Structure formats: structure tokens, C-alpha cells
Image (tube, rainbow, N blue to C red):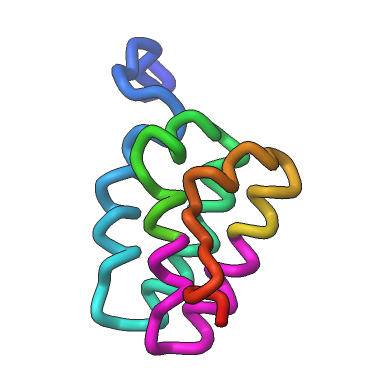
Amino acid sequence: SSGINAEWPLRPGEYLCEPLRKCLKDEDPYVRKTAAVCVAKLHDISAARVEDQGFLETLGELLCDSNPMVVANAVAAISEILDTNPNAAKQVNIDTPTVN
């Protein structure tokens, strides 16, 4: 036996959602900045899952983070996602006061 369960109940990326959600809210800015990049990578695997799980909204919230590296990674992740899916902008909720 190869040890791989052919009937694995989770779809690709599904097992990542709850840990990623926790990391995006972690008190350590290094964890949050890394999690922001992970949202973009998960979007490559399953755009619908990222949208359904509210990760785009959370990335939008990270634009107001107190740590500039978290903000920079959130901007990079949002930019990467919008390059492949311009319609995602509706869920990011970027408004002028946030950007300014």
C-alpha cells in the first residue's frame, strides 16, 4: 500500500482554510504577512474557496494593519489575485480612506 488514501474527503486546499484564517488574525506580524501571501497561493489552487471563505475581505482588512510588512504583503497578494481575477476587486472592499 502506498499510504495514500484515494478516498481522501477533502478537496485541494480545503484543509488549509481554518489554519489560514487563524494565521491571518495572529498577533505576530510575521505570521500575518506570511499568511497574506498564502491567500494568493490558495487562490491559484481554488479561487472559489478563497472567495467563499472570506479571505479577500480579510486581505482588505490587512491593508490597515499596524505593521508595514503585513500591509505590503497584503497589497502584493491582492495585486496577484486581481491579475488573474479582476472580478475579485468587489470582495476586497478597497476604499479611498483605506488607501489614503
Tell me if 81 is positioned left or right of 26 in this view. right
Above or below, 41 against 51 in this view is below
- The quadrant in which the C terminus is found is bottom right
Residue 63 at what x, y percent from top left? 48, 73
Magenta stretch?
A: 60-77
Residue 79 at what x, y percent from top left? 68, 59
Q: Residue at point 50% right, 52% down?
A: 92
Q: For residue 99, what is the image quadrant? A: bottom right
Q: Residue at point 48% right, 74% down?
A: 98
Tell me if 63 is positioned left or right of 87 in this view. left
Q: Residue at point 38% right, 33% down?
A: 52
Above or below, 82 against 46 in this view is below
Q: Is the magenta stretch mostly helix, strand or loop?
A: helix
Tell me if 51 is positioned left or right of 81 in this view. left
Number of residue marks: 0
- The quadrant in which the N terminus is found is top left
Q: Looking at the picture, tell me which residue is in the foreground, 6 or 38.
A: 38
Q: Does residue 72 show up magenta in the picture?
A: yes
Extreme residue in the bottom direction: 67
Q: Looking at the picture, tell me which residue is in the foreground, 91 or 44.
A: 91
Residue 86 at what x, y percent from top left? 69, 42
Q: For residue 51, what is the image quadrant? A: top left
Extreme residue in the top direction: 7
Q: Residue at point 43% right, 21% down?
A: 2
Q: Does residue 48 show up magenta in the picture?
A: no
